[in-house]
């Protein structure tokens, strides 16, 4: 492939660009993921910091576990953001697809029990399947979901969560029924990612290994999602979200776009479910179906609404916020007189405080900053870019 | 036929309670474009106040029911004034989240009042049975059908015939035009919530009369009203009555016959049958049975 004739030669370009980092002479440079030097530097620094973290004294095993859950939630959050944020289809059924992924993983990777079966396969089979099976179900449901919009769609997808609970509970051979079943072991070629290991003479904690594994997955999936969002399909998502009739008039295939959004979103949800199963250790239908399922779906809505609608980094920030906030409330509850744990007789339980905080934050963000925490960051950045002028 | 009658009557009884709840949802949705997730909590508090008025204040049962309906109408109207009125003009999703917040607050209140106990509402029907078309049916089911249908009919006639009802319908149609004609739109919002709260209290009483009594967790029965309103169409009162009855009957029939004729559905399929029906119907009619088709413009 030859370069277009009107672009400046790389060497000359570099000379022109020195001191003018935001002058783009090529379309590709403008569209690049890391299009400024500051972005390049800080992204690299952040990646390094996250990799080094497990080896620093700050990383207790409990906090590494929390951060791992943050990454797993971020994967699920990116999935929901693709369908709800980018394509504008509000889904309350995310918990159903997460549960589907979790039970697929447990069935394909698990050992047969008294009532439940298991295929005892390794992770390089069960993890992709944990994504593909929900994706197949998502593709089946999507043509139906594409017919309805708004509140009808939200309650339709909520129906999936309740139907899902019934299926999870009754299909004992796969799900273990009421009591659920153990999570599969994340083993590839004999290497267990959820066990203390020695690599090149360095001793790794169990939590550190799983943390790094989830981190690698998150980076891969996040970059894939980001690339999808800036491709032709991603622009079709945005067109459908902004005005679906107009999009159709301009030749965007409505059904195909919505089906794609649901399919990819369900794939991410399934991967999230498979990993979440390992983080939980034991999974039951009550984790993902019925009321708990509804709350889980609302939690993921909180991830994208608080983090930032239609941004990938926003989903990650939101996941960190939603997962870590309850931990901080737990720590703070020792110092607030009327908040206590379950059954402590306090005026509000920690669980209730979390519910109220999430609700209040979602409302506050929807009204004050619909772009979420990511929007706050953009505001801050633009303020300092123009400083000391107001614009 | 003999064995069918109790199943049908039970289905109609449950279904008319759902219809009562659904009408409450629909009235608020039509007036304010908000799906009121606080309805389940209003229902539980309504049942609690019936019990409170009967046992603590010694009121006769019918008086206690009316008093409880008035109490919940006041609570609902107050909620609207405090929590929802500031949300006028904000994104509808934010308003829906606010009602969810109200639900959490009222639910915590209900937990404070009721605790983990089960309370009974002191209804005169109990578990007694009566003869109906040659079959034995529960009195309570007949009571549910009669009371719900009377209440819904009163609301329907009020909306159709009275001056205030006309103003409410005008508000539902177009708020600005209603305002221009001299309708006090804010008061109409409050009134919709009040009616909805009263209906929720009545539904709570009817659900509490079942053998189990009322505990805060019964609130989640009210979630069944969601498939009902979607099936009937979000903005149709008539639709929610038909949909409530369809879903009640379907539930009753599945509970009785699914074990015999379709064991592969698994036990307790009746709990999810409303959602299954909703999904199937939406495939054919995306706006429910009676919902207004949205006119889309570019």
Image (cartoon, grey):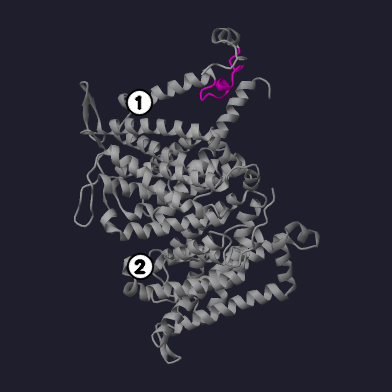
Q: Can residue B188 be seen in this view?
A: yes
Q: Residue at x 35, y 59 (%)?
A: A167
User: Horizontal placement of B67 versus B120: left or right?
Assistant: right
Q: Is residue A328 visible?
A: no
User: Horizontal placement of B254 versus B176: left or right?
Assistant: left
User: Horizontal placement of A235 versus B279: left or right?
Assistant: right
- Locate residue B263, reporting x and y percent: 31, 69
- Residue lying at the far left of the rendered structure: A114
Looking at this view, is A50 or B186 the one in front?
A50
Q: How many labels does the image show?
A: 2
Residue B59 to residue B135: above or below: above
Q: Mark 2 points at which residue?
A: B268
Residue B182 to residue A242: above or below: below
Q: How crowded is mark 1: few (under 14 residues within 10 Å), some or many (20 or more)?
A: some
Q: Dividing the picture into quarters, in which one does residue A176 lie?
A: bottom left
Q: Mark 1 points at which residue?
A: A53
Q: How crowded is mark 2: few (under 14 residues within 10 Å), some or many (20 or more)?
A: some
Judged by depth in the image, the label closer to the viewer, 2 or 1, is 2
- Locate residue B27, reporting x and y percent: 62, 66
- Locate residue B183, reporting x and y percent: 76, 63
Q: Dividing the picture into quarters, in which one does residue B254 lie?
A: bottom left
Dividing the image into 4 quarters, which one contains the C terminus of chain A? top right
Q: Is label 1 in a helix, a strand or a loop?
A: helix
Residue B170 to residue B297: above or below: below
Q: Mark 1 — on which chain does it sit?
A: A
Q: Which residue is drawn at 54% across and 10% down?
A: A10
Q: Which residue is drawn at 41% across and 30% down?
A: A219
Residue B159 to residue A140: above or below: below
Q: Mark 2 — on which chain does it sit?
A: B
Segment colored magenta? A20-35
Report how far apart the C-alphas of labels 2 and 1 lie in the structure: 49 Å
Looking at this view, is B62 or A244 the one in front?
A244
């Amino acid at each position: 492939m030859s370069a277009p004739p009107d672009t400046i030669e790389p060497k000359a370009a570099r000379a022109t660009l020195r001191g003018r980092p935001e002058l783009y002479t090529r379309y590709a440079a403008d569209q690049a993921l890391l299009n400024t030097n500051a972005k390049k530097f800080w992204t690299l620094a952040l990646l390094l910091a996250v990799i080094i973290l497990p080896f620093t004294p700050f990383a207790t095993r409990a906090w590494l576990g929390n951060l791992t859950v943050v990454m797993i939630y971020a994967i699920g959050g990116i999935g929901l953001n693709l369908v709800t944020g980018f394509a504008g289809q509000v889904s309350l059924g995310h918990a159903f697809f997460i549960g589907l992924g979790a039970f697929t993983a447990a069935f394909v990777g698990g050992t047969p029990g008294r009532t439940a079966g298991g295929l005892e396969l390794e992770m390089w089979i069960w993890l992709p399947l944990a994504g593909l099976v929900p994706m197949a179900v998502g593709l089946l449901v999507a043509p139906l979901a594409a017919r309805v919009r708004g509140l009808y769609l939200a309650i339709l997808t909520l129906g999936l969560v309740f139907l899902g609970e019934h299926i999870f509970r009754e299909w004992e051979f796969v799900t273990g029924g009421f009591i659920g079943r153990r999570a599969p072991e994340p083993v590839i070629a004999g290497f267990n990612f959820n066990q203390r290991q020695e690599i090149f003479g360095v001793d790794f904690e169990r939590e550190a290994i799983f943390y790094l594994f989830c981190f690698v997955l998150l980076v891969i999936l996040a970059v894939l999602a980001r690339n999808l969002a800036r491709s032709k399909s991603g622009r079709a998502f945005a067109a459908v979200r902004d005005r679906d009739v107009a999009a159709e008039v301009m030749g965007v295939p409505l059904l195909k776009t919505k089906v794609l959004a649901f399919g990819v979103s369900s794939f991410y949800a399934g991967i999230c479910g498979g990993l979440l199963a390992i983080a939980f250790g034991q999974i039951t239908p009550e984790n993902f179906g019925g009321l708990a399922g509804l709350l889980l779906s609302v939690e993921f809505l909180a991830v994208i609404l608080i983090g930032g609608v239609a941004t990938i980094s926003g989903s990650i920030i939101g996941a960190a916020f939603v997962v870590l906030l309850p931990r901080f409330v737990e720590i703070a509850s020792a110092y607030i007189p009327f908040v206590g744990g379950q059954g402590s007789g306090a005026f509000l339980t920690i669980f209730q405080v979390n519910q109220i905080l999430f609700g209040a934050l979602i409302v506050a963000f929807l009204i004050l900053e619909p772009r979420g925490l990511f929007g706050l960051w953009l505001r801050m950045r633009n303020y300092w870019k123009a400083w000391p002028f107001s614009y | 036929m003999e064995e069918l009658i109790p199943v049908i009557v039970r289905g109609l009884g449950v279904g008319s309670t759902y219809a009562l709840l659904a009408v409450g949802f629909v009235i608020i949705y039509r007036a304010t474009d908000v799906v009121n997730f606080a309805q389940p909590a209003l229902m539980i508090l309504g049942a609690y106040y019936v019990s409170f008025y009967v046992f603590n204040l010694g009121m006769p049962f019918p008086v206690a029911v009316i008093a409880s309906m008035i109490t919940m109408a006041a609570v609902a109207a107050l909620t609207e004034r405090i929590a929802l009125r500031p949300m006028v003009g904000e994104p509808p999703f934010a308003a829906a989240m606010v009602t969810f917040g109200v639900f959490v607050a009222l639910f915590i209140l209900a937990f404070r009042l009721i605790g983990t106990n089960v309370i009974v509402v002191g209804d005169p029907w109990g578990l007694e049975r009566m003869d109906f078309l040659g079959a034995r049916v529960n009195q309570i089911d007949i009571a549910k059908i009669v009371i719900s249908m009377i209440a819904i009919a009163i609301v329907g006639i009020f909306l159709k015939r009275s001056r205030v009802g006309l103003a409410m319908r005008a508000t539902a149609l177009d708020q600005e035009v209603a305002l221009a004609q001299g309708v006090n739109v804010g008061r109409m919002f409050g009134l919709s919530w009040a009616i909805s709260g009263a209906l929720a209290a009545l539904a709570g009483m009817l659900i509490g009369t079942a053998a189990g009594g009322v505990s805060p967790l019964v609130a989640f029965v009210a979630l069944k009203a969601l498939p009902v309103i979607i099936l009937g169409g979000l903005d149709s009162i008539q639709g929610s009555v038909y949909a409530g009855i369809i879903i009640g009957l379907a539930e009753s029939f599945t509970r009785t016959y699914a074990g015999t004729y379709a064991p592969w559905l698994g036990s307790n399929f009746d709990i999810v049958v409303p959602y299954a029906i909703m999904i199937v119907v939406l495939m054919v009619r995306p706006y429910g049975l009676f919902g207004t088709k949205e006119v889309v413009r570019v």
